[in-house]
Structures are given as C-alpha cells and as structure tokens.
C-alpha cells in the first residue's frame, strides 16, 4: 500500500484549529502527496473563534459523543460504539477510509472492525497509560522514541513496532544554507520556544541561569499562563533580562528562533526523563545551526556534537555557562552545518517515506485482536 491517493482519517488529541504540532504537519504532508485527509479531533467550544489554519486540503470532521463513560465499559462495547462513529465520519467525508491513522489513546480504546489499515502513531510517552487495546489491535505501530517502544513491547508484543522519530516542517529549512556562517561574538540573546504551562519545566534551574547571566536577554516564545503556580516561574518572569512573548505564528517563530545566540530548554528529567526522551523542539532548534543547551534527552545521548546536555538537574546552569564560555568554538561553520544537516535528514517527507516502507512490509495486515 502506498501513501498516495488514499482516504486517510487522522484521529488526534489536538484540534485542527489552533497551535499546529507535528501531527498537523504529517496531515499536511499527506495532502501534498495527493491523499484526501480527514481530521477528527476533540470538540472545543473556543475553537469556533479560531481562524482556519493557513494550509488548505485537510477536512475537519465532527462527531457527537453521546455515550458517556464508554471507556470504562468492556472493549466490545467500545469497538461497537467507535465503529458507529467511524461510519458517521465516512458519511460526512463522502469517502470510505483506506487508513485510520490514530495519534490519540484517550478516546477510542480499540480499533473497530473496519477494512481500513490501522496505524497507531505514538508521539508521547505519557499517553501510554491508556489505549492498550488500540496497541494490540493495530496493524502497525510507529513511535518517536526507544522509551516508548520498550513500554509498548510489554503491552502488545505481537504487533509490528518501529521507531520513526519526529519530523520537521520544511519551512524550518528554507534558506538554511545561509545559516552555516560561523559566529564568534559574545552571546546576547537566548531563546526558549515551547509551551510554558506544563509541569515538566524546571523553573528553578531557569531562574538560576537568568540570574547568573544578567547581560544575556532570555526570551520565552510560546503559550504561557501568567498565573502558573510556581514561585520560581513568578520570580523569573519579573527579572529585567527575561521576556515572555506569548504565542506567535510559525512564520514569525522561525526567524525569532534563528536570531538567537543560544537556544535552550530545561525539564525536570529526574522525574520525567522518559516523557521528555525526544522533544520535537530539538529538531527545530537544530535546523537553525545555533548552539543548544538542554536537559538530558535520551534520543540524543552521546551527541555532544549536536547539543550540550545536563545529565543531572544541578548540571544545567554549568552547561549553560560552558556554552557562553565556549561560544566561538561551538559556532564554527562545521559545527553549525552538522546540526542543520541532522535536521535536514528528518523532514516530513523523510518520515512519510519511512512509514510507507513499513506499511508495505506488513500489507496485507495480519489482524491482532486484544
């Protein structure tokens, strides 16, 4: 089976409208290959006020959730219920789905009996606590990290399972050839892009770094809750060399990340090491060629040529200081080109080519039922 000319239903825990993530870029890449792509995300009242995304070609579908508590009922009921919903979605789409591409383990708990190819795409470790019936009834499972695969093998040992990693929106590589020029000036701007209302971020370490480097401007770009209940966060956001910009569009984000001297992120990896084994932001950072300082990231262990990692929480501030001290050495043309080259090999097109080969290997599927 090729990933071209197909009717593909994507089931996502995120809505189509709003902040676009790797799931959305997969959908857009599938459209570019001539597929009809249908998006079934959760219903949120506030999404009615969000303008349509810039990329056309993906059709949103909606279904009323009328059986509350269905995930606490036997899997046979779950399969019947979501089988009905899938048929309703096909009526909306005016098409029979060839592939059900599922990113979400929170709703459907088992793939319904349907002739479509069942592809389960696991992006985050912290969604593995549900959806075990989905894992066991999938035709193919793909993931972003070895830590995810290790867990899934204990749940669904008989299902084909492969790590495909994350994929990069091609916009991050537009004009990247010009980013390999070496830099030797003293770093003045450090940028962290992401979502700043989750419980994984080590605000204490970030506060320490900002206090230790008052001559550097620390810019945080992304969703933020100004009332987030962390004393360290509240102290950090009041520092004179710290700025929170809020969410910006992708077209605005890319040049803002590129203009940084140092890119950084910091998670509480003593508690959330498996959950943060492969943040998607690392690929975006690498595409700029800029120096990166991060907390321990399992999928990049041993890759000091790509970024400086703090293997213990207490090591983040010293690693950031090392990046400042060795800024010119870390910013040679060769070092910058190496980072960009790593990102260039991991675009959406590369990921879809990889998944297509995996689908061909297991087509026609041997059905697994939990």
Image (spheres, rainbow, N blue to C red):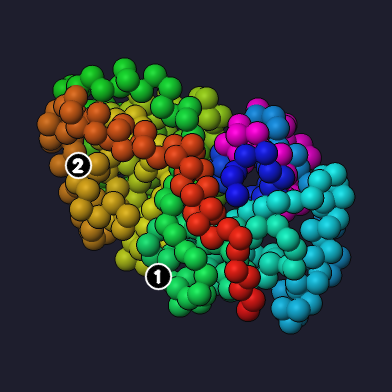
Image position of 290 (left or right of 86): left
Q: Decide if residue 162 is on the left or right side of residue 131.
A: left
Q: Residue at x 18, y 28 (%)?
A: 334
In depth, the one of 208 and 32 nearer the eye is 32
At 51% from the left edge and 43% from the top edge, which residue is drawn?
352
Q: Which residues are magenta?
A: 27-54
Residue 190 appears in which quarter of the rendering?
Answer: top left
Q: Tell me the element at label 1.
A: helix
| Depicted 234 relative to depicted 269: above or below | above
Between residue 343 and residue 197, name the one nearer to us: 343
Q: Position of residue 290 (x, y in %)?
A: 28, 31
Residue 51 among those drawn in magenta: yes
Using the image as rendered, state which of residue 356 and residue 344 is in the foreground. Answer: 356
Front-most of 326 and 38? 38
Q: Quick one: label 2 or label 1, which is nearer the N terminus?
A: 1
Q: Which residue is mark 1?
A: 150
Q: Quadrant of residue 4?
A: top right
Is 271 rendered above or below residue 286? below
Q: Is residue 272 visible?
A: no
Percent position of residue 9, x then y: 70, 50
Instruction: Please give the residue where the numbered disc 2 appears in the rendered image.
Output: 305
Q: Report whether 172 appears left or right of 302.
A: right
Q: Is residue 149 above or below residue 285?
A: below
Q: Secondary structure at mark 2?
A: loop
Residue 242: image location, x then y, percent: 38, 36
> Which label sits in the foreground, 2 or 1?
1
In the rendering, at what x and y percent does residue 308 appear? 22, 45
Q: Is residue 91 left or right of residue 235?
A: right
Q: In which quadrant of the rendered image does the C terminus lie? A: bottom right
Q: Residue furthest front?
A: 364
């Amino acid at each position: 089976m090729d990933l071209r000319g197909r009717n593909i239903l994507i089931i996502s825990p995120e809505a189509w409208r709003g902040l676009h993530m790797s799931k959305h870029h997969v959908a857009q890449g599938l459209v570019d290959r001539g597929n009809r792509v249908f998006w079934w995300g959760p219903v949120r009242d506030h999404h009615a006020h969000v303008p349509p995304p810039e990329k056309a070609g993906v059709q949103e579908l909606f279904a009323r959730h009328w059986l509350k508590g269905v995930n606490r009922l036997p899997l046979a009921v779950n399969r019947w219920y979501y089988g009905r919903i899938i048929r309703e979605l096909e009526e909306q789409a005016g098409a029979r789905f060839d592939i059900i591409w599922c990113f979400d383990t929170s709703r459907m708990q088992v793939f319904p009996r349907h002739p479509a190819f069942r592809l389960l795409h696991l992006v985050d470790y912290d969604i593995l606590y549900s959806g075990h019936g989905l894992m066991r009834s999938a035709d193919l499972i793909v993931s972003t990290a070895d830590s995810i695969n290790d867990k899934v093998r204990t749940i669904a040992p008989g299902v084909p399972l492969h790590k495909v990693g994350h994929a990069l929106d091609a916009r991050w590589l537009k004009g990247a050839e010009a980013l390999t020029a070496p830099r030797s000036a003293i770093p003045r701007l450090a940028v962290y892009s992401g979502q700043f209302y989750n419980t994984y971020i080590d605000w204490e370490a970030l506060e320490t770094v900002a206090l230790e480097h008052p001559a550097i401007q620390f810019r945080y770009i992304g969703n933020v809750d100004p009332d987030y209940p962390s004393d360290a966060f509240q102290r950090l956001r009041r520092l004179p060399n710290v700025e929170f910009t809020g969410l910006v569009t992708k077209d605005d984000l890319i040049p803002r990340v590129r203009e940084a001297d140092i890119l950084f992120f910091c998670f509480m990896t003593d508690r959330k090491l498996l959950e943060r084994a492969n943040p998607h932001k690392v690929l975006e950072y690498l595409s700029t060629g800029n120096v990166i300082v991060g907390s321990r990231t399992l999928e990049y262990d041993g890759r000091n040529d790509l970024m400086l990692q703090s293997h213990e929480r207490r090591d983040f501030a010293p690693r950031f200081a090392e990046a400042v001290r060795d800024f010119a050495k870390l910013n040679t043309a060769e070092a910058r080109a190496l980072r960009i080259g790593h990102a260039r090999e991991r675009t959406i097109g590369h990921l879809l080519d990889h998944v297509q080969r995996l689908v061909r290997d297991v087509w026609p599927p041997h059905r697994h039922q939990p």
